[in-house]
Amino acid sequence: MPKATLPAGTPLSVMVDNHLPMHAGQSIRARLIYPVYADNTLIFPEKTILSGTVTELRSNHSQRVNARINGDFTPFHIPVVRFTQITLADGTSLPLTTSTATDGAPLIRLVAPPPRKGCFIRKQWDSGVQILKDQIATFTAPDKGDRLLQLFYHQLPYHPERIEKGTAWTVETAEPLSVPQQSALSPAGTVASSSPATAQPAQTTIAEERGGRPTWLIQAYLRDQLTSATAKSGQTIEAIVAEPVYNPDHTIAVPQGATIVGAITQVKPARSFARAGTLGFDFKRIVLPSGQTQNVQAALIGADSASAAQLAMDSEGKVKPKPQDKIVVPLLLVLLATRPLDSDHGNSNLAGKNFVGANGFGLVGNIVSLARGSPNVAVGIGAYGAAVSLYRRWIAHGKEVTFARDTRIVLQTTPRNAAVLKPEAP
């Protein structure tokens, strides 16, 4: 029976649909987020099932430190996963060898917004409104019940760990995989959906005509990690096209496996006093598998990232961490910390005031304040929480912008003074 071959090193992005216990040896059943191609042929459609296990648990040192500062002594871990089997559409299971992955986290599609209009004050107002909307979403977005329960758990000094629903990993095939031809689907004339559940609607892979020139929406994987901590302006970067892009006549405009070459255009490492890093890049050239080169003008319009909830992209594709609420939250914590000293109503509700004020060390702080019954102890614990909040928002080292290897990106690409690419000769 004829077979299609998936090369070694092919990225496979997968996601789990349920919460899983955090245990070594835990079995994992995940689905492909995106379709997988080889030689412009669809090998695996999205939602294809992969099976694997958690091979080991590694200490998550940074999360442990941050949690202990807040009174949570849970020994947080990072699961190391490996996938060993893939189930085809006809029910056939094939053995699979992949690399291990440790960067699992719920993925969100980071999308470039339309250009903002108005003066500086207007833009700052819009940013503040967006921060407020993000905070309100904690209580209104789907699964709010589970999210609030987890928020309560993190106030406890210890709580069970789990692999969150929606956690995604990108692994690479460690060896070539032969797939029966009847299970390898042809993409001719098709448009495959290519978005995770949390992403924006899938973009078409058919080139669109704008102003008499074709516009391509290209799905690609970054070849190497990019981070504002070490990147240099002008540094060359590459991405591998994950899905073929077709011309309106269904000939191939951009083949799967082509390399898009670009450069870092803007970079600023994070610094002290909460000054965040900044990263910007673009792509100017497509190199086909045959070596043919095409000049292009590309803009980053989307990227999947585990940290996308904390990142923001502007209309030019520059990425930086979202601005934090540096005023309201610390001020609220200061006001709550001084609550136990309020003697307007005597000591009739001293226990309640102490409980509200001592919110700087999780549930442990609240219990200690109630046990001591001293407003000074409650104020001290509350002041500690306010100081931690102020430190993180105003003094601590800012956050870097990092895109892991094999990050899925979306580019809007238009040829510059060059003919449309045509299919390569067999």
Image (cartoon, helix red, strand yellow):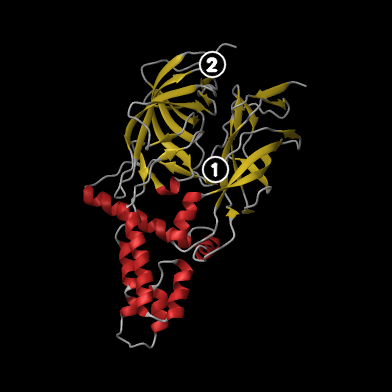
Q: Which residue is mark 2?
A: 423
Residue 356 screen position, x and y as percent: 40, 75
Residue found farthest to the top: 425
Q: Please indicate, yes or no, whether residue 318 appears anywhere in the rendered image.
A: no
Label 1 vs 2, first from the N-terminus: 1
Residue 243 screen position, x and y as percent: 55, 28
Q: In the shown orientation, is residue 285 left or right of residue 102?
A: left
Label 2: which secondary element:
loop
The answer to which image quadrant residue 424 occupies is top right
Q: Which residue is mark 1?
A: 196
Q: Is residue 55 above or below residue 156?
A: above
Q: Residues within 10 Å of mark 1 (few under 14, many from 20)?
A: many
Residue found farthest to the right: 1
Quadrant position of the C terminus in the picture: top right
* CB-based contact (under 8 Å), mark 1 and mark 2: no
User: At x 31% / y 68%, what residue is drawn?
Assistant: 334
